């Protein structure tokens, strides 16, 4: 099956030779072909180029005059399998309560865990599938989904089995992340080490034996898990074949970035409290610094120093953190806007941060994140828009007209 997209106003993020990430000053470079074509064969990108080299025939031909074509967003950090919303806590935030204060009152992650433990796999699957269908429409083609709202071995396995079923039935590329160390159950208050022992001795082996996760994650931050506890859990996860990722430095300079680098973590995420020492550690690593603009916006937190990271030569990725408490949106077009307005990224840098660099952060960059021959045909066609800069500028409206995943229109 050959599908030809012709008369493309701008074919964005094109590569003749695939890169694994875009760093530093290169993030401002966004290769684009004006008046272009894109040829898809079955599930893969077969060819692209200027219209004067466009093929004359195909099984399906789409005229994209006046429209841009971009690779689908890769959302490398979400918690979108959950039970119920938390809008009442949103009111508490408006009244001035902090993230930690809400958690101490039994809200936050604890609230979500109690609800999830009561929900069936079927309920969780149906709700999550609706969320997946929503993010497809706004341009996401790959998503990492974390567990972490379980707090018990049974509930954590339930989440991961739901993620496995979603992966089997959704056209999205989905990666599963075991985040057993997302918070501390009330019954383990004052004895966190005992809960860490349970994660190491019981949860990780069962997750690995069932092959339920690609990654292991830990919330290494003030009031949650220490560097030493994180080190222990990551060590066991790596032994069991799970690639490390870290929630780090959201609430304080926790040492989470450094322990992530120590274990060659695929990414360290959040990063609101990141200084020169952390930037230096990341410069000598293969770890992708990943910022979650939606959470900082929703919680009114300090913004991670994205500009300093880029100026230092680092790559930067930006993901949605889609979850019911601190970032109840999976719209990556909104992340583009946040990247530009709040973090002062150029639109070109923002596109790199939400496509190729997030593809790296979820270990799918060999197949996704750019328009490159041989990569999976995950892309979207915009509505008629004047420039690529219009995408983050005109916020609040879906600017996507057609979506293709695995070479098929959705």
Image (spheres, rainbow, N blue to C red):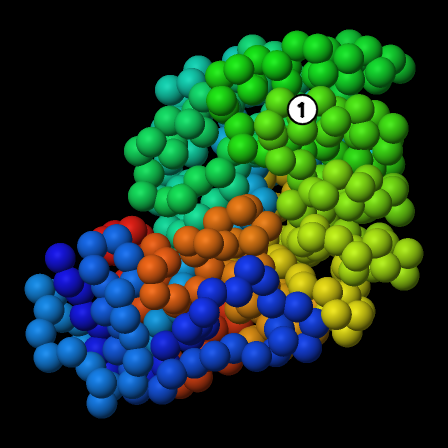
Residue drawn where x is 38% and y is 34% of the image? 167
Residue 365: x and y, percent?
Answer: 49, 54
Would you place residue 171 above or below residue 210 in this image? below
Front residue of 406 and 337: 406
Residue 312, by quadrant, is bottom right
- Answer with left or right where residue 388 lies relative to residue 341: left
Q: Residues within 10 Å of mark 1 (few under 14, many from 20)?
A: few
Split into 4 quadrants, where in the image is the N terminus?
Answer: bottom left
- Answer with left or right where residue 7 lies relative to residue 111: left
Residue 17, by quadrant, is bottom left
Residue drawn where x is 56% and y is 76% of the image? 348
- Answer with left or right where residue 386 lies relative to residue 101: left
Front residue of 147 and 19: 19
* Count of residue discs: 1
| Kind of element beneath mark 1 | helix
Residue 98: x and y, percent?
Answer: 81, 40
Would you place residue 409 above or below residue 169 in this image? below
Residue drawn where x is 54% and y is 33% of the image? 214
Residue drawn where x is 53% and y is 28% of the image? 213
Is any part of residue 220 visible from this angle? yes
Instruction: Report the residue marked by disc 1.
Output: 239
- Answer with left or right where residue 195 lies relative to residue 327: right
Residue 292: x and y, percent?
Answer: 66, 53
């Amino acid at each position: 099956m050959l599908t030809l997209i012709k008369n493309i106003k701008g074919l964005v993020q094109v590569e003749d030779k695939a890169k694994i990430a875009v760093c530093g000053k290169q993030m401002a470079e966004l290769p684009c072909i004006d008046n272009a074509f894109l040829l898809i064969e079955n599930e893969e990108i077969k060819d692209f180029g200027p219209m004067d080299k466009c093929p004359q025939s195909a099984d399906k031909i789409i005229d994209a005059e006046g429209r841009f074509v971009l690779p689908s967003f890769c959302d490398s950090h979400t918690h979108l399998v959950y039970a119920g919303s938390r809008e009442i806590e949103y009111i508490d935030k408006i009244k001035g309560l902090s993230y930690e204060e809400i958690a101490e009152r039994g809200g936050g992650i604890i609230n979500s865990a109690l609800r999830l433990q009561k929900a069936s796999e079927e309920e969780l699957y149906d709700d999550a599938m609706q969320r997946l269908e929503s993010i497809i429409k706004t341009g996401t083609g790959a998503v990492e989904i974390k567990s972490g709202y379980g707090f018990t071995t049974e509930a954590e396995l339930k989440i991961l089995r739901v993620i496995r079923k979603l992966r089997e039935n959704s056209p999205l590329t989905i990666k599963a992340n075991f985040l057993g160390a997302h918070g501390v159950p009330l019954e383990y208050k004052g004895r966190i080490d005992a809960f860490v022992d349970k994660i190491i001795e019981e949860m990780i082996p069962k997750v690995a034996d069932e092959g339920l996760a690609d990654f292991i994650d830990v919330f290494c931050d003030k009031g949650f898990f220490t560097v030493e506890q994180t080190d222990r859990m990551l060590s066991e996860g790596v032994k069991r074949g799970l690639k490390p990722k870290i929630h780090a430095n959201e609430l304080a300079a926790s040492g989470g970035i450094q322990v992530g680098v120590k274990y060659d973590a695929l990414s360290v995420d959040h990063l609101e409290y990141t200084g020169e020492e952390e930037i230096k550690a990341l410069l000598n690593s293969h770890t992708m610094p990943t910022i979650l603009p939606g959470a900082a916006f929703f919680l009114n937190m300090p913004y991670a120093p994205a500009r300093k990271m880029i100026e230092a030569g680092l790559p930067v990725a930006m993901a949605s953190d889609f979850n019911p408490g601190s970032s109840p949106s999976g719209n990556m077009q909104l992340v583009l806007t946040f990247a530009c307005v709040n973090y002062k990224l150029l639109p070109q840098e923002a596109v790199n941060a939400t496509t190729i660099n997030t593809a790296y952060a979820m270990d799918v960059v060999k197949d996704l994140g750019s328009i490159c021959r041989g990569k999976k045909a995950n892309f979207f066609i915009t509505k008629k828009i004047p420039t690529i800069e219009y995408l983050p500028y005109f916020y609040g409206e879906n600017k996507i007209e057609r979506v293709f995943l695995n070479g098929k229109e959705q």
